[in-house]
Amino acid sequence: MKQETNQEYLLEIKDLTTAFLFDGKPVPVTVNVSYGIKKGEILGIVGESGSGKSVTVKSVLRLLPSPPSSILNGEIYFHGQNLLTLKEKEMQKIRGNKISMIFQEPMTSLNPVYTCGNQITETIMLHQHLSKEEALKKAARMLDLVGIPAPESRLKSYPHQLSGGMRQRVMIAMALSCEPELLIADEPTTALDPTIQAQIITLIKELRDSIGLSVMYITHDLAVVAEICDRVVVMYAGMVMEIAEIRDLFHAPLHPYTQGLMQAMPRINQQSEMLYNIPGMVPHATQMPTGCRFQPRCPYATEVCSQACPELVDAGDGHMVRCFHYEKLRKERVQNG
Amino acid sequence: MDDLIQVSGLKKYYPITSGVLKRVTGHYKAVDDVSFSIGYGQTFGLVGESGCGKTTVGKSILRLIEPTDGQILLEGKDLRAMNSAQLRSARKDMQIIFQDPYSSLNPRMTVMELISEPMKLHNLASGSELQDRVCNLLETVGLSRIEMKKYPHEFSGGQRQRIMIARALSVQPKIIVCDEPVSALDVSIQAQILNLMKELQQNLGIAYLFIAHGMPVVKHISHQVGVMYLGKLVEVADSESIFSNCLHPYTQALMSAVPIPDPDVKRKTMIIKGEVPNLAEKQEGCLFAGRCSRCTARCREEAPILREVESGHQVACHCV
């Protein structure tokens, strides 16, 4: 990628290959992952379990323990600075301060023996060097921002006294308390009811609009992606398969995997007897097929697919796709209207 | 034809005790006066937010949880009146599948042992016949007979759920209670399991009580859908009308929260405001009244009962 494109991105991941030890040998679980996120953008990272979406973002924050993990190759630029070359001390200044992360399970990511106020102020005092009193005031403001009623009294609550949706809000408040530029949300609503999910999605969108937050939103739910994201990265078996603007992805997916995911989804506004299903399952990192990694499950696969792995190419207007047959998919769509 | 399962007035109250003497000071009404029926080979979807009592209903029907009151008829026979021997033989007709395929299979048992266990318990087969049946079951759920000697940890989530289904099918049940069977699975695997369940229903005529919070999944698989709110059924209708023409304000709010997989559709989410009432306290009027936009004086005083407003469409709301 050229130097100009770097300017566009707040965070850019380049050729990231992360490996884990299997039987003492490092086996790559993500291969040459490259994508970037622009300022004020909500970028969706989509894929099934084992596709490497969480590994990639955890590599960004250097949260993976080493061993068993190791980064074999790649660079991660944040404001032109390669995060992978930073010392742990410097990394701590970025983590939770410039880049924050929220996790899937608000039940397990909050410490049950401390009050919410304690946990939020810890972050604020650490990074912003405020006094306890100022930090508490700020924590209350943050809880108010994420829509928690009576924030002062909630600061004294313990996590078990709050509902799942409230806990996730506390997590978001904590993540936003140091005014990060980038929020990484790893399946933030997967464990929540649809009504609460809708509230969290609305909240994240509002924060983007009001404070210009950039968000990397990891999920396997394409319906949520359609609601919230501007651009989407589709990953499969540790590789980026497709990157597209949200409308392009939903109206004209060019990778057979993306197309399969769309068709496998039951829809509330459609009745069908049987769902399309992608045969087989995601291969294990130690048993990757030759050539294209999706080839054994792909209805479009031909001989060439098992011989070589396709490159991620620009199919026009920045729509990136890793498939030998994307032109065929495009033609089929035109023919079928 | 009569219904396979008829539930009427099902109640499950948990006592709330206080003090050293554990005096009962009140009751938490987890399930309160729930009635519905499921026909042969039909799927009844039960939806609602977490904590609304849908799992309690599922388990109460199998008497895995002992209900406080109510009647459960399986082919006309009252399950609550049965003694343990009768119940054991009735259990052959009713099986259950759980959400988490990781924790619901014994890690020390092979697939052969897991699937044959129910048949052994009910003395349905032994020896080589047992083995043949396990092979057939594995093939029915899309696994191969080579997998028989493997342990659960060697399988993925989707495969484990297939093993659970094979195990449930082994006693040839008439109904399977499915408690969030696909919620923990990936989209493509979810589609595989849903298709398998539909196929089995078509071929074997099994009925399902399908408990889930994912609306599109429920719509896809159910013939009838019941919506629960705080232990009560607030709306029951066939799948098509509940998704296109729901009448209860709570159902409407619930439906509006379901994300639509189309970036061009801008939906309006109705945010439910107001406090959820404390079920441990005595409640008067409609439980949804405090959060309902159409609440009237009557709603606060008199609890609405589930009544039929259109053919096959029941709603518990004064305003409909």
Image (tube, coloured by chain):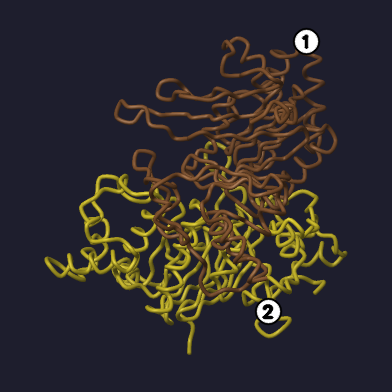
Chain colours: A brown, B yellow
In the figure, residue A61 lies in which quadrant?
Answer: top right
Along the line of sight, which residue is nearer the eye, B217 or A82?
Answer: A82
The secondary element bearing badge 2 is classed as strand
Confirm or deny contact between disc 2 and disc 1 (CB under 8 A).
Answer: no
Q: Mark 1 points at which residue?
A: A131
Residue B39, percent across and down? 49, 80
Q: What residue type is labelled 1?
A: Ser
The amino acid type, in three-letter code, at marker 2 is His
Q: Which of A254 and B262 is in front in this view?
A: A254
Where does the image place residue B207, in percent across and percent down from the top left? 45, 75
Letter of the chain that mark 1 sits on in the rendering:
A
Q: Which residue is drawn at 54% across and 24% down?
A: A63
Q: Is mark 1 on a helix, strand or loop?
A: loop
Asked if A152 appears above or below B214 in the picture, the reply is above
| View extreme (left): residue | B127
Q: Looking at the image, which is closer to me, A8 or B104?
A: A8
> Which dot marks residue B313?
2
Name the quarter where the C terminus of chain A is drawn: bottom right
- Residue A148 at what x, y percent from top left? 78, 37
User: Is A283 situated above or below B302?
Assistant: above
Q: Which chain carries label 2?
A: B
* Snapshot quadrant of residue A58: top right
Q: What residue is drawn where x is 33% and y is 49%?
A: B155
